[in-house]
Image (cartoon, rainbow, N blue to C red):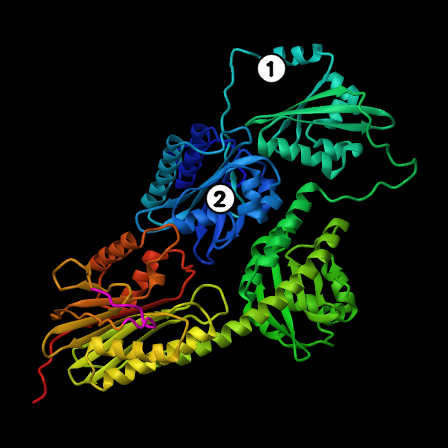
Amino acid sequence: MPGSKEHPGTAGSPDDALGAALADTVRGTGASIGGLYLIEEAEPVLRLVALCGLPLAFSAPWQRLPLTAPVPVADAIHDDTLVSVAGQDEMARRYPRAAAVLPYPFALTAAPLTGVRRSWGGLVLMWPAGRPRRISPRERGHITSSARRMARLLDDAGRPPALPDVPRIVPVDATRHPGQTGLAAADYLERLPEGALALDLEGRVTLVTTTAARLLGRGADRLLGTRPWQSLPWLDDPVYEDHYRTALVSRTPVSFTALRPPDQPLTFQLYPDTSGISVRVLPSAERTEAPPPTGARPPVVAPTGRLYQLVHLAAALTESVTVRDLVALITHQILPAFGAQGLVLSAVDAGRLKITGHHGYPADVMERLDALSLDTDLTPAGQVLASGAPAFFADPAELAAGYPEAPQISGKQAWAFLPLIISGRPVGCCILSYTRPHTFTADERAVLTSLSGLIAQALDRARLYDTKHRLVHELQRALLPRALPRLPGLDVAARYLPAGHGTEVGGDFFDVLRLNDTTAAAVIGDVEGHSVAAAALMGQVRTAIHAHATAGAAPGQVLARTNRLLADLDSELLVSCLYAQLDLSRGQASFASAGHMPPLLRHAGHPAAVLEIEPGPLLGIDTGDDYPLTTVPLLPGTTLALYTDGLVELPGSDVTRTTTDLAGHLDTADGHDLERLIDRLVRHTTPTGQHTDDIAVILLRASRLRDAPA
């Protein structure tokens, strides 16, 4: 069960075995904190499923992360390698968003959970600040083997486990001495002249001595089970709670002084370990800030955890790119942070509220609420946009008082209507809803109001990005072939996949040409850079190759003549290109390459391999050199794979190894359906579906040879 305090056993479910493996890894590596992330395939996002050494509340900003999030565990999964951060300075430099939410001294290592056929997720380990700045080869091997052990557990299960809504808390058993009794320890503490407290990992008081209760001015019965900053008003300040968080995350002693009214300064010394924090309480002569005047109302402060959560959400909102990203962020991070279950995100469009994303509502309700006029009286959305002030409704009766139909439409029980406004201009409306009545505290109202401005900025940027993205990819599609020609005896499939993010047009291109009844040509290439200029040059190159090929030029001549054209155009961009001519009557394939990635070749009944082709210069470099010709047999059942570098040039990997591995996958995959084979090749090199460069792929298979026409 989520949040269970029982130690998992390996004999139970796969979840228990994973929990036990995580606890063993934390103990074996000397880490103070451990977390296990699994990939939620439907999104895809990373879900924190198990946690050691931290309270559940601390993990709120990290429980769901996009696979592209700028955090170490996402990088470890993407690059399939260990990612180590030696300290706070390095964290701030490499991962500023993570450093803003965890401003504590600690070291961290993230490792991917890579199974036989897929990536399952990642492992995160954290150590106290006093640890050596770099992990040793032995530690690296231990962490890697532990990650492989967890991946094997998932492989053996054969399918992804059910992911919990909140992470399981997995305890790490600390060393204890059964011969020593708790009564003896209590007697020892009572004899000391100073006060002593014990806090669990959640910050709750589990032990308080008589001296500590006297110094704190509160009886033990009123302290046990509470958090000091909640039961002692004079400690209700984010600064003091943050000292506790610092000790817990960094696992280093922390000392601070606070003023117990009216004039008694007390020093608190915190000593953390894997089970909790021991606190010494001593009178102090250190001067502290005077308390507010008698009768003055103390300022209302948000809990430190809420402040860090706000920083985390604000940073995440600034990094959301598309409207889809924004809806996913609100759904997976903002809704859980405020206990909400439903979301409707609308954008102002021609005087109406067009729904751009939603969660927790049936489709028929969204159809009824979509494209409402801004002056609608069906919901408060238009009114909050007109006034610029958010509206909060704790139950259906409050909402029905002004909008009788609204509660019946949605079936929800509480709502927060947040106007999205930028410099007085209405951008849209964000509605958070609850399945039960919910009273909004002053803290929640303040934070949601602050977030509404950030959501407005994010929505405006995301809509602009989506518009530009749609336009550039329409341009990209216009420059690529609309359909592939049919040639009896040759099966063809091709795919173009744009990069995951970015509004620039890619320079990858491909084409398949029917030269006569028994001959075809396939061309694939990549223009340097991502820009409109690259797309324009790509169109010119493709047109030139088409003209020379259909005029009867040999493969080397096609590239040489195209190269002269680029030299005449005096373009600053270079182009790689691979040209293949397939003669089905003679049973041979001829290749010429302008510095492009070598193709993969699989003859029926033989292993697939990388075809070695002597390359010529890149197009755009006028060297006067020829483009050598490479000819191989084209037998029935032969499969050829042509591709651009986006398929094999992966961060943190060797291109030669990746290409050879891809050939091996082509060898073992069922190639009957070429479209499905492209899917498998792409998924093999980019299992998460996230790629930072464009990908173009052509698969060709000679199904039978053709006789030349009489």
Q: Is residue 545 left or right of residue 584?
A: right
Amino acid at dot 1: Gly
**What x and y, as percent, mark residue 403?**
75, 69
Query: Within the image, what quadrant is residue 29 found in?
Result: top left
The residue under the point 11% across, 76% down is 705
Magenta span includes 620: yes
**What x and y, as percent, mark residue 496?**
36, 70
**What x and y, as percent, mark residue 253?**
63, 26
Q: Which residue is mark 2?
A: 49
The residue under the point 56% across, 31% down is 129
Q: Which residue is mark 1?
A: 182
Q: Which residues are magenta?
A: 614-623
In the rendered view, tell whether residue 223 sits above or below residue 350: above
In the rendered view, tell whether residue 44 sits above or below residue 580: above
Q: Is residue 414 visible?
A: no
Q: Quadrant of the C terminus?
A: bottom left
Amino acid at dot 2: Val
In this view, the residue in front, 283 or 218, is 283
Q: Is residue 586 left or right of residue 665?
A: left
The 10 Å Cα crowd at callout 1, few under 14, some 14 to 19, many 20 or more, is: few
The residue under the point 40% across, 39% down is 13
Query: Within the image, what quadrant is residue 199 found in?
Result: top right
Query: Within the image, what quadrant is residue 231 found in?
Result: top right
Between the C-alphas of marks 1 and 2, the distance is 34 Å
Q: Along the polypeptide, which appears first: circle 1 or circle 2?
A: 2
SS at badge 1:
helix
SS at badge 2:
strand
